[in-house]
Image (cartoon, rainbow, N blue to C red):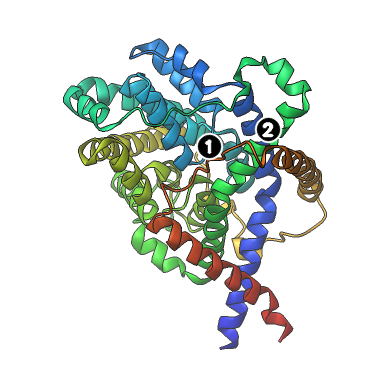
Amino acid sequence: MSNFLSLWNEAATTSLGFFWMALWAFILGYVISSLIQVLVTRRKMQQAMGEDGPRSIALGTFFGFISSSCSFSALATTRAIFNKGAGLAPSLAFMLASTNLVIELGIVIAVFLGWQFVVGEYVGGVLLILVTWMLIRLTRPRRLEAQARRKMDDGDGDGDGGNSDKSWKEKITSKEGWQAIAQTYVMEWQMVWKDVLIGFTVAGIISAMVPQSFFEALFIGAGGENAANPGFLAVLSQTLVGPIAAFFTFIGSMGNIPLAAVLFAQGVSFAGVMAFIFSDLVVLPVLRINASYYGWKMALYILALMLVGIVTVSLLMHYSLALLGMLPDFSGQTSMGEREFFKWNYQAVLNILFLTATAILLWFWRQGQKQHSHDHHHHDHDHGGSSLTDKVLSVLVVVALLWLAGGVVVPLF
């Protein structure tokens, strides 16, 4: 029993330590993302993006990069852009870029996993877009695309809140502009906090309680003598298991990073970990939301495209790094349970700075709320309606909070 209690304490401390490690990275990422979302309107994006062709793909990628968000809101924006007439390939380029080429994701990956994975994330993200584009060119899903467009109605004219006539300079120097930025910042957090809380709690539990033998059984070749590069078939099977593992964790990409760090510390290869990180668009809720937007055929087509892309790109990145002799080696990783999370260092300073920034933004947000309370309807991005996923998430959030609280107070008894 006392063994379980000490593991419980370790799991909870690890989860909170993960969050402390990543806090400044989250805040920085969401501040940047909120600035861009307010300063660059969606209407401008749609005007600039065409049907197909290199320029459209490049623009889709660029707009995705600057309007980074959690996979669920990326799906809604992708749908709006596709709905307004952008081609399938640029729309998917936008979707992939806004979930993979994400500023805050890169920062969090740097904190947890190191520079090779940051390179893997960005270079791999671009490759993923190119592979998807190539697959669309090869499979030419004209009929599917037409069906999907018929299924969508023009019922969702997503406005950009009335201030799209102002230039970005006016927005950034006006109080209203900052209220809009603060509003977006709060909405970003509203979208992800449940995913993040559950993701970090699960990562702590897995780190403290799941034995290494489990990972070695699941990911063939993990944790062995040459785990960094265990031979082609082992690497291939790991890139297939990565997306499957992600499919059932259904945590948004930001919540997945500490889990990826746990996998890496357990000796899963670079390709396996990258496949796991890239898989935030092949999780169950995303499939369900896409099906409700475009119909099941199109949703499954997109899922197949993503899977082929993820496996191909993870292998490409893995063997490119292997050629250059730059594969990260997990043996240098301190095991998560043995890390000192809470000490006075640059992370603590950054956390305090960025928490102060959050407080200032919250003040602007409150001011904005007071003004808008009577004349503003506010639409939340959620995980596709107050659906089953949402109910499950809400229950899990309560469980996670109780678990963390319990784990922290255990040593007192």
Q: Are marks 2 and 1 in contact (CB under 8 Å)?
A: no
The first of marks 2 and 1 along the sequence is 1
Between 60 and 317, which is closer to the camera in this rendering?
Answer: 60
Residue at image position (35%, 60%) is 218
Q: Position of residue 115 (x, y in %)?
A: 59, 37
Q: Distance between the residues labelled 2 and 1?
A: 14 Å
Q: Is residue 240 left or right of residue 170?
A: left
Q: Is residue 105 left or right of residue 245?
A: right
Q: Quadrant of residue 316?
A: top left
Q: Which of the two discs, 2 and 1, sits closer to the camera?
A: 2
Between 87 and 10, which is closer to the camera in this rendering?
Answer: 87
Q: What element carries label 2?
A: helix
Residue at image position (33%, 52%) is 244
Query: Residue 345, which numbered label?
Result: none
Quarter of the rendering occupied by the C terminus: bottom right
- Residue denoted by label 1: 69
How many marks can you see? 2
Q: In this view, which residue lies farthest toward the left?
A: 143
Q: Is residue 31 left or right of residue 242?
A: right
Between 41 and 241, which is closer to the camera in this rendering?
Answer: 41
- Residue denoted by label 2: 181
Determine if residue 322 is in view: no
Amino acid of disc 2: Ile
